[in-house]
Image (cartoon, rainbow, N blue to C red):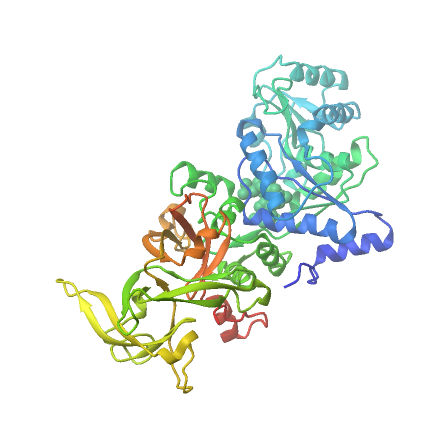
């Protein structure tokens, strides 16, 4: 995986053609979040596209907060969004910008539209305006206020701004065509009265521009060349152009639409995400099960893997739903090369090596990552009593079980070959200990006579083991398409979080930092959670080792990008 995007898509083609023809000399894009929630994986796609195109063409990308809807906005969201864009690996050279910075100019430009007869103040209430908009098959009805004299419109608009009228009493509408086949051109609303304090402009304004008016004009003000948005805005493009052509600017930003990202087992609507947080279905915005960037960060997803994911998803003109397994695949591929390995036993079972002297110990140098020679080695200490994974022992194993069972020999990673001689149970009959002999000639885990030993187990020395809590996360939603058959929340998975409190790790795990991801050998990738305290580590499972996505791809032969097995 390289960080250079070599997959072509139609927007890149357009950008390159515009540079080649000289329509633009520098590409200027923008990422325009509304500060009314946290960024999610869908936004990551838009961020990668907008910042990526600017980066690769030597242009620039603005971060612009689309803060025209003060009721729902909050500085908490602004800060979170800035953090998340930076975390994705992108930077804005100026700004960040805010649509609210342009309120004066937007107001002047609206006056300009009024003076030119392109906009009017309508006294009808919201319901009447909705009712008279018509339908797809029937034209709308013109407002009785549509032909108001310019002077009267100017006066009323100024008084709207001055706060003379209550919320909803009047609106400013563009004067386009109530019979247009495009509903967006049926005299769309440009300004609403809202006596609401704005997080940035305070009480200075009581009229706020609509998205349709603010967005394109903000693009024009910032000199945006390519305004990229999702498909549902395609029908707004004629309005976007209509407005930009009529306000006093020579800028000609152009809007292009691409498919919104959807992903299996997840919802990506901010409204839904807010509900998940407020109703307590998750621990917060950064719960590792959340598709928010904050959640993905806490889950341990490296930003490079997320950028890779966005590139592989591509930029298309038709909506589709991407498999969550593809994201997991990208994460694994990255972490396989970058995450150091550690031995951690999630569900410990005691093993006593009876042939190994009491009180003795030995230290073996173990590679940190066989995929990365630079990662070096670390010492692991072996002794008579160790922990192994309960699931690695079976008294009565089925045919294809190659791990430990009575009489069977296995390898303890980097240490010795051991053979199970005896099983100890408690009164209830549960196995509480396995007793083994070892082959002293197999130091480092290699059979002296080259005999074949199939199973290799990870283990942790008992006297130096550190305890930790491990949080095993799974999809938040059991259904691939949440809400496809009824209520979204009915599809919440009951098993999306399992907490293991008795795990045991080799001491080197204590040297990790919060947010660092390591491979627990044979288990998966785990990220140290900020809930960790000295002596009480907490790790979140980022992703398991088994790549079912790549396996499915190989089976159906759909793509050549299927990954290698992360375990070696
Ligand atoms: P939601 O529908 O979840 O409320 P939104 O589109 O209103 O999302 P914004 O904050 O307005 O969210 O989005 C900022 C930018 O991110 C917009 O340009 C939008 O097109 C883009 N974006 C949002 N969701 C997705 C998605 N799922 N896939 C791709 N781009 C997205
Ligand atoms: Mg939006």
Q: Is 84 displayed left or right of 353 in the figure? A: right
Residue depicted at x 45% and y 47%: 529
Q: Is 370 displayed left or right of 233 in the figure? A: left
Q: Please state the horizontal and vertical placement of residue 77, each as a whole percent of the image.
A: 55, 35
Q: Is 45 displayed left or right of 423 in the figure? A: right
Q: In which quarter of the image is ligand 1?
A: top right
**Quadrant of the rendered structure where residue 385 is?**
bottom left
Q: Please state the horizontal and vertical placement of residue 460, each as a whole percent of the image.
A: 36, 62
Q: Is the N terminus in the top left, top right, bottom left or bottom right quadrant? A: bottom right
Q: Please state the horizontal and vertical placement of residue 9, each as a whole percent of the image.
A: 69, 59
Residue depicted at x 66% and y 62%: 2
Q: Nearer the viewer, residue 203 or 136?
A: 203
Residue depicted at x 71% and y 30%: 175
92 shown above or below 202: below
Residue depicted at x 43% and y 52%: 540
Q: Which of 54 and 456 is in front in this view?
A: 456
219 shown above or below 515: above
Q: Which of 84 and 155 is in front in this view?
A: 84
Q: Which of 198 and 51 is in front in this view?
A: 51
Q: Please state the horizontal and vertical placement of residue 312, each as a whole percent of the image.
A: 61, 61
Question: Can see residue 402?
Answer: no
């Amino acid at each position: 995986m390289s960080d250079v995007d070599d997959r072509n898509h139609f927007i890149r083609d357009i950008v390159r053609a515009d540079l080649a023809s000289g329509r633009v000399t520098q590409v200027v894009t923008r990422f325009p979040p509304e500060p009314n929630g946290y960024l999610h994986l869908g936004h990551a796609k838009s961020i990668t596209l907008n910042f990526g195109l600017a980066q690769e063409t030597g242009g620039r990308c603005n971060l612009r907060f689309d803060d025209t809807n003060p009721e729902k906005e909050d500085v908490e969201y602004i800060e979170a969004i800035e953090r998340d864009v930076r975390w994705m690996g992108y930077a804005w050279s100026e700004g960040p910008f805010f649509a609210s910075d342009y309120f004066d100019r937007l107001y002047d430009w609206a006056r300009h539209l009024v003076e030119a007869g392109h906009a009017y103040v309508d006294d009808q209430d919201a319901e009447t305006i909705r009712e008279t908009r018509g339908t797809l098959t029937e034209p709308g009805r013109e407002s009785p206020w549509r032909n108001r004299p310019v002077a009267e419109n100017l006066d009323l608009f100024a008084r709207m701004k001055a706060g003379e009228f209550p919320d909803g009493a009047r609106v400013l509408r563009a004067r386009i065509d109530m019979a247009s086949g495009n509903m967006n051109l049926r005299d769309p609303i440009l300004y609403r009265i809202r006596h609401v304090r704005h997080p940035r402009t305070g009480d200075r304004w009581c009229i706020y521009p609509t998205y349709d008016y603010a967005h394109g004009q903000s693009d024009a003000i910032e000199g945006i060349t390519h305004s990229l948005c999702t498909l549902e805005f395609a029908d707004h493009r004629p309005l976007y152009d209509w407005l930009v052509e009529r306000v006093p600017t020579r800028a000609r930003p152009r809007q292009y639409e691409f498919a919104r990202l959807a992903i299996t087992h997840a919802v990506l609507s901010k409204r839904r995400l807010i509900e998940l947080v407020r109703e307590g279905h998750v621990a917060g915005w950064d719960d590792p099960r959340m598709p928010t960037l904050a959640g993905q960060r806490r889950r341990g997803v490296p930003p490079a893997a997320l950028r890779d994911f966005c590139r592989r998803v591509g930029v298309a003109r038709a909506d589709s739903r991407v498999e969550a397994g593809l994201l997991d695949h990208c994460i694994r591929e990255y972490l396989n090369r970058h995450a150091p390995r550690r031995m951690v036993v999630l569900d410990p079972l005691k093993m006593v090596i009876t042939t190994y002297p009491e009180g003795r110990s030995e230290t073996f140098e173990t590679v940190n990552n066989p995929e990365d020679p630079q990662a070096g080695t670390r010492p692991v200490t072996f002794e008579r009593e160790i922990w192994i994974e309960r699931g690695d022992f079976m008294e009565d194993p089925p045919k294809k079980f190659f791990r430990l069972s009575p009489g069977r020999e296995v390898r303890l990673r980097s240490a010795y070959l051991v053979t199970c001689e005896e099983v100890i149970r408690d009164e209830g009959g549960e196995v509480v200990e396995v007793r083994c002999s070892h082959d002293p000639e197999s130091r480092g885990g290699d059979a002296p006579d080259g005999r074949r030993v199939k199973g290799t187990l990870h283990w942790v020395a008992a006297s130096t083991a550190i305890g930790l809590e491990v949080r095993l996360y799974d999809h938040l939603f059991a259904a691939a398409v949440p809400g496809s058959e009824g209520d979204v929340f009915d599809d919440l998975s009951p098993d999306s979080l399992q907490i293991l409190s008795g795990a045991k790790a080799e001491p080197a795990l204590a040297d990790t930092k919060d947010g660092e991801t390591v491979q627990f050998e044979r288990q998966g990738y785990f990220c140290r959670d900020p809930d960790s305290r000295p002596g009480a580590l907490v790790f979140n499972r980022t992703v398991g080792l088994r790549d079912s996505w790549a396996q499915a791809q190989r089976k159906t032969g759909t793509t050549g990008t299927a990954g290698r097995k992360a375990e070696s």
